[in-house]
Amino acid sequence: MLSGIENLTKLHTLRHTFSGHLIMQGVDLPIVKKLMCHSDIQTTMIYAHLSPDHLADAVDRLELE
């Protein structure tokens, strides 16, 4: 481990999981940014990966006539 910090990978995974679940529950990115203590929204976007099922559900919300 180069950083000298044990369980760094687990912490990183936890942050991804935390932010992903917030976003999938509809929490706005600026709020996730603040909760994650990011100074730049671009950093938050790195964590904002969504599951394919969640993306498909978003498209299904469109009301097509």
Image (cartoon, rainbow, N blue to C red):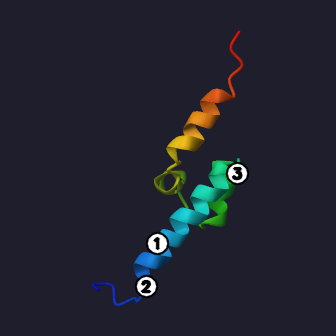
Residue 8 against residue 35 in the figure, above or below:
below
Q: In the rendered structure, which disc, 2 or 1, sits on the residue that comes first in sequence?
A: 2
Q: Residue at x 59, y 43 (%)?
A: 54
Q: Tag 1, which secondary structure? A: helix
Q: Tag 2, which secondary structure? A: loop
Q: In the rendered structure, which disc, 3 or 2, sits on the residue that comes first in sequence?
A: 2
Between 4 and 60, the one lying in front of the other is: 60
1 or 3: mark nearer the eye: 3
Image spot of residue 60 (x, y percent): 64, 28
Residue located beneath label 2 in the image? 7
Residue located beneath label 3 in the image? 25
Q: Are marks 1 and 3 in contact (CB under 8 Å)?
A: no
Image spot of residue 55 (x, y percent): 56, 38
Residue 42 against residue 3 in the figure, above or below:
above
Q: Tag 3, which secondary structure? A: loop
Residue located beneath label 1 in the image? 12
| Crowding near the residue tagged with mark 2, few <14, some 14–19, many ≥20 C-alpha atoms within 10 Å | few
Q: Is residue 54 among the parts visible in the rendering?
A: yes
Q: Residue furthest front?
A: 53
Q: Is residue 10 left or right of residue 35?
A: left
Spatial separation of the CA atoms under disc 1 and disc 3? 20 Å
Q: Residue at x 49, y 77 (%)?
A: 11
| Crowding near the residue tagged with mark 1, few <14, some 14–19, many ≥20 C-alpha atoms within 10 Å | few
Q: Quadrant of the C terminus?
A: top right
Q: Amino acid at mark 3?
A: Gln
Q: Are marks 3 and 2 in contact (CB under 8 Å)?
A: no
Q: In the rendered structure, which disc, 1 or 3, sits on the residue that comes first in sequence?
A: 1
Q: Is residue 63 left or right of residue 23?
A: right
Image spot of residue 24 (x, y percent): 64, 50
